[in-house]
Image (cartoon, coloured by chain):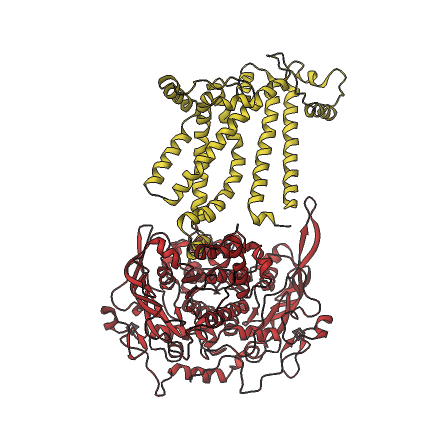
Chain colours: A yellow, B red
Amino acid sequence: MTAYLARRVLQALVVLVVVTLIVYALLTRVPGSALGAVLGPHAASGFLPRYFSWLNQVLHGNLGFSLLHNEPVSTLLAASLPRTVALTGTAVLLALIVAIPVGMLQAVNKNKLVDHVLRALTLLCYGTPSFVLGSVLILVFAVKLKWFGGEGPQAPGFVGVITDWRDLTLPVLTLALLTIALFSRYLRSSAIDSLAQDYVRTARAKGAGERRVLRRHVLRNSLLPVVTLIGLTVPQILAGAVVVESIFNFQGMGYQLWYAAENHDFPVVLGFTLVIGVGVVAGSLLADVGYALLDPRVRYAGR
Amino acid sequence: MTSSLPATGSGGVQGGRPAGAGEPLLQVTDLHTEIRRAGKLVRAVDGVSLTVGQGESLGLVGESGCGKTMTALSVLRLLPPGGVITSGRVTMAGLDLTAMAETDLERVRGGQIGMVFQDPASSLNPTMTIGDQVAEAVLLHRGNDRRAALERAVQTLRLVKMPEPERVAAQFPHHLSGGMRQRAMIAIALACEPRLLIADEPTTALDVTVQREILELIDELRHRLGMAVILVTHDLGVIAGRTDRIAVMYGGRIVETAATATVLGRPRHPYTEALMRALPELAATGSGRLASIPGLPPDLTEPAGGCRFAARCEHAREYCASRVPELDGDHPGHSYACFFPVAQAADGSAPWLNQLSTANGHPPAAAAVPQQPPVLQVQGLTKHFAVTRGALLARRVGSVSAVDDVSFEIAAGQTFGLVGESGCGKSTVARLIAGVAQPDAGSILFRGADLNQLTGRDLRGQRAGIQLMFQDAYGSLDPRMRAASILREPLLIHNSGRKRAHRRTVARLLDEVGLPPDTADRFARQLSGGQRQRLALARALILQPRLIIADEPVSALDVSVQAQILNLMRKLQRQYGLSYLFISHDLSVVRYMADVIGVMYLGKLVELGPAHEIAASPSHPYTRGLIDAIPAVLTGKDGARPAISGEPPSPTNPPSGCRFRTRCPRAEQICAEQEPPLVPAAGRTGRLTACHFPLPPVPPGGTVQVTANTE
Ligand code: SF4
Ligand code: SF4
């Protein structure tokens, strides 16, 4: 497996280099002295040397200076990144907790009423734009029923966000509903595949009851492909976060990115883009590692 | 955990009669099972009744789609989605399995009745260790704690003769070979000492030599544990020596049942008889045709009234189409569902058997050593595949010697048969000759021209003279293309002739391979297995080749259809003067088809000679092993000699000296030190053998192959 992982990490590194090159190239086009602010007055000349000294700065946390906030980009990032992680993390967790049983239930009752109803529901969640979904939730649960807050948590930091469950619920729900729809559809089809496998019949022939068959044999094998897919949905989830954060006035990365883009604050846009790029690459890498750990066929391949 | 498996069973069985006096262990009464799928209703099992006594073994035989697997699955109510038992009863030791609640049935599954499935590769959970999978069965029925269950699992793995059971228990299915996986499956089924084992095609996915080991294991365990066995198979040879009774199924019904020796020695139902005559190992070599059964098994969505075999039956009369024959017979213990059963000779034996034994005595002259100029000459063909390891830079750590110094030639109008177990390199030889892969060394001369020296147009011209045919016609024919386009494609690629001419050629070829003209407009996926193989043959023929490489062309087909395809291939051979390179793992099929046979083992050609002589008197121990491993239908017994055991070692690191020595019963010191060259065998003509201690020729009169033993 080490061979596989090493290859996979190398691949991820290559992608990252490409991402930094693109961001750098864009940065050179930015009007004003955005790049100069990073590189300092004594910077080298020439594309590559300048790229490397920029990269060096980036690796040391120097992402430039926001034109709008008059603050280093890194400071903005430090404030917003944990908040976004808290939001998306909770949403993905919630989505998994709901999507796994939903997907399994659909697979077991394939093409029966339960399946149709659930499929219609998930399709609805999937098809409704996040801003509509978010607005409806705010109207019903915040304005009418007053159960939850209509704005995201405003307290700073990761802990501040996740402890404010009253304000956190609606943004997480909005984001999670979309994600539930994604995951449960994957899980449904992958569980239908597993259910049709011969080893499920073997398990039944052993005398395993339905629940045991599902838990021990179907679930694990169905989750395998889903793990990879979770990694691949990171960009979609982040895109969802941008919308949700702006609806709920939640100052996370998505919010800042949105705001910066609207106001032509290029250093912030590119700095955040870079970080998101790293996040996406890391997400798919983690998914593959998880897959390798779960699947013995990969785990032992090539020793 | 102290309990161990009992050493002997309770229900010993002598002769062909069930020993379970009184109450039978399993009783199936008038079972009807239907499968609803995609708006169609298939009456898969249509009134099957059978009994299995304590410790008895029953063979359930039939071709695909005859309902044998559905009958087996109905017993444990493990039917696929859409499958329902609509009427009938299944009782096991007095318990009604059909009426029982699901939770009660779970106690029976794996506890009282163990089941083994066809494909061990897909029937084991890929993400659980072997030990856990066996232990699961123990936990479910014995409620032991995990440690005890695992211990019991290892014990059961030892019982099924799994090498290194402790180590294997911690491994995952993909670590094991096919034979070992099937042993693991059997261990799962036997972990709780069931009283009945149902084995559904347990060896179909395995090599012959492994097949024999698995069958012997099941047989031995049956006697040791005193359990009853239902062996479901399409292969008459598999059950011949191993079951007390046979039930032959056709069209969802049992058409004949009796003691094994009775059914095989004196079949009364025309279908049983036809099945046996279609077996290539019973066909007289070289001469004549295989008796094939015309047509296809019936469509069970709308079974016709009357006898279901009527459309294909030689004995059918008008009467048969209007009434359904019931399962009974003129002798007690031999029942058959037929109005006009096959006649018996005065001595009670089947008349066609006698013809067969005389035919076997005279090998036809046509099978003599080739005199025609060779179409294909292969010299010193060698192919290695690199094995690489390493994360970033793939280092070459070794090589698999897939084909090593193989030489042979094929005469015009003749068939060269290449036999060996899977992984012996026979398919690689095919790929090299077809130009799909490039050899590392050696030459391939096709009609005198070296294919490796040719380029461009010349090469393409010569290549058109060699065509391929595969086992999996479905995979090699685009399912979304119509038959006509599939046939026209090669013509377009080779840019020959005009459109109108194409259409005529297509029509003519469809006719030649026995497909109705309207096949031209049908999609490949709409055709049956046999029809697809006919289409593949037509496609191979369209460029008028001299040589057709047929890689396991009939392995996926039912016996009756297999016989049709083999006959067709022979007819076309005579008609066009074709040569075949016929590759198969099945020696009996190769013997029927080939004039000359080459036997491969781990990339080496180990024996070469005239087909009927090799089959009658092998000189290489491996060839002998292959022949012994073929279950003989008529003698009802496997050879007394121990067949070769185990599975081939890895070709990455073949044994020194003779590659076969790790499995050879005759191996001695020198075999490990010196590689035996392929040289003429002493005392035989036209025979090459690579062995230091070749077997002596079998004296005339004696044979190692099946003889018509009619009691
Ligand atoms: S009943 Fe008639 S059609 Fe059926 S098997 Fe007998 S002879 Fe043939
Ligand atoms: S050379 Fe030796 S090991 Fe090889 S087949 Fe002959 S007797 Fe067996």
Residue B589 position (above or below residue A281): below
Seen from the viewer's position, the closer of residues B242 and B140 is B140
Residue B692 position (above or below residue A110): below
Occupied quadrant, residue B63: bottom left
Q: Is residue B322 visible?
A: yes
Seen from the viewer's position, the closer of residues B320 and A1 is A1
Seen from the viewer's position, the closer of residues B369 and A199 is A199
Residue B223 position (above or below residue A96): below
Q: At x 70% / y 56%, what residue is drawn?
A: B398
Occupied quadrant, residue B694: bottom right
* Left or right placement of residue B455 versus residue B201 in this view: right
Q: Position of residue A61 (x, y in %)?
A: 67, 22
* Left or right placement of residue B57 versus residue B211 in this view: left
Residue A2 position (above or below residue B464): above
Q: Position of residue B348 (x, y in %)?
A: 36, 85
* Left or right placement of residue A120 versus residue B681 in this view: left
Q: At x 50% / y 59%, what residue is drawn?
A: B120
Total numbered labels: 0
Q: Position of residue B167 (x, y in %)?
A: 60, 58
Q: Position of residue B128 (x, y in %)?
A: 52, 51
Q: Quadrant of ligand 1?
A: bottom left
Q: Is residue B594 visible?
A: no
Q: At x 42% / y 31%, what residue is drawn?
A: A126
Seen from the viewer's position, the closer of residues B430 and A114 is A114
